[in-house]
Image (spheres, rainbow, N blue to C red):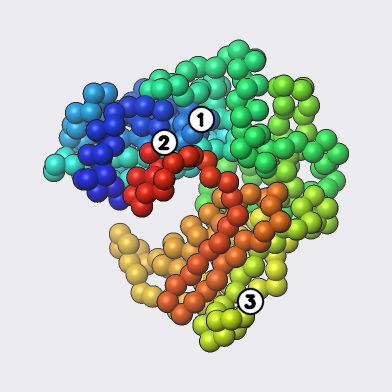
Amino acid sequence: MLTEQEIKQIISKGEGPRIEFKQAQNGVPATLYDSVCAFLNKEGGIILLGVTDNGVVLRLDAANIVQLKQNIVTALNNPDVINPPYPLPVRDAAYEGKNILYIRVPVSSLVHKHAGIIYDRENDSDIKVTDERQIGEIYFRKRQSFTETQIFPELKMEHLNTDVFAKVRKLIAAINTTHPWLTATDERILRDVNFIRRDFSTGEEGLTLAAALVFGKDETIGNILPAYKLDVMVRRENTDRWDDRLPPLRTNLVDTYINVLDFVKSKWPEKFYIEETQRKDLRELIFRELVANVIIHREYNTALASEIIIYTDRVEAKNPNKPRFTGPLRACLNFV
């Protein structure tokens, strides 16, 4: 949760390439999803809801906050609003006794559209992008930063694992029984998440590295990324080597996520925890974020391995990746 000091620093900077203010006094701001889309496509950023353009903090009605959050979260999962969908948490904060909300938007490896239109961020403005040359520049920018968007012309549907598609549908059905992917073809799913993409600078279209990583057969992944692996170890007694470990994982990211999460959870006792009158597994809440971030935020073209190491009092993750921004790292505000 943002502290008052952090909010004060953000407001003092004012709106810019990675900061946006929205009033949200009368519901979801009409331009909110323009900004979300632009941030996803450019450098990411933070959106404060309940703040005017010139930095005056208003008071969001506490009675309306729950509905406001629900509407935004639902919309971010709707491909008619943000395509491909990009779920983001909407969090509460307070400044000088006034309730506000904020959304941290990371830079995405995909090119996103809001209501069928691509948006880019320039200074404090969300710009509609319709020119083919400019669209091509955005795809090129993504390709330079995110190697998983690289197109492999000889990667075909036959190189993907149909069992993984079935597993994904089963996981989705447990959450949403009306999700369109439950009846969609495998190719439709790949297109919805831009795993089949078109390079507007060359006209080339095909499956991407991301498609291989998420849905590929083991031999497909091994051929494309022979050095890729994820190590998960327990170091509680033998801290020089390990007490227990998973065999190095070189499989698709869906099975990797499931196997790693189950292993890490098995090494910690379940603690009694209730949230909003419902009992929840703290291990699930904490470690699913850890495992997901290790999988998502890494550079897959590097020969270095990802590691998750379980100690007596902590879990550490080591991940090879590319820094997205320049400048010094700060504990609290390095995002903006």
**Residue at (83, 41) in percent of width and height:** 156
Specify the label residue 45 is tagged with: 2
Picture quarter containing residue 123? Answer: top left
Mark 1 and mark 3 lie on one chain; the one further toward the N terminus is: 1
Image quadrant holding the C terminus, namely: top left
First in sequence: mark 3 or mark 2?
2
Label 3 to label 2: alpha-carbon separation: 37 Å
Q: Position of residue 330 (x, y in %)?
A: 37, 49
Q: In the image, is 192 to the left or to the right of 9?
A: right
Does the residue at mark 2 contact the one at mark 1 (Cβ under 8 Å)? yes
Q: Which mark is residue 280?
A: none
For label 3, the SS is: strand
Question: In the image, what residue type sits under mark 1?
Answer: Lys
Spatial separation of the CA atoms under disc 2 and disc 1: 9 Å
Against 166, residue 35 (above or below) is above
Residue furthest top as drawn: 131
Q: Could you say whether the residue bearing mark 2 is in a helix, strand or loop?
A: strand
Front residue of 313/264: it is 313
Name which residue type carries label 2: Gly
Which residue is under mark 3? 245
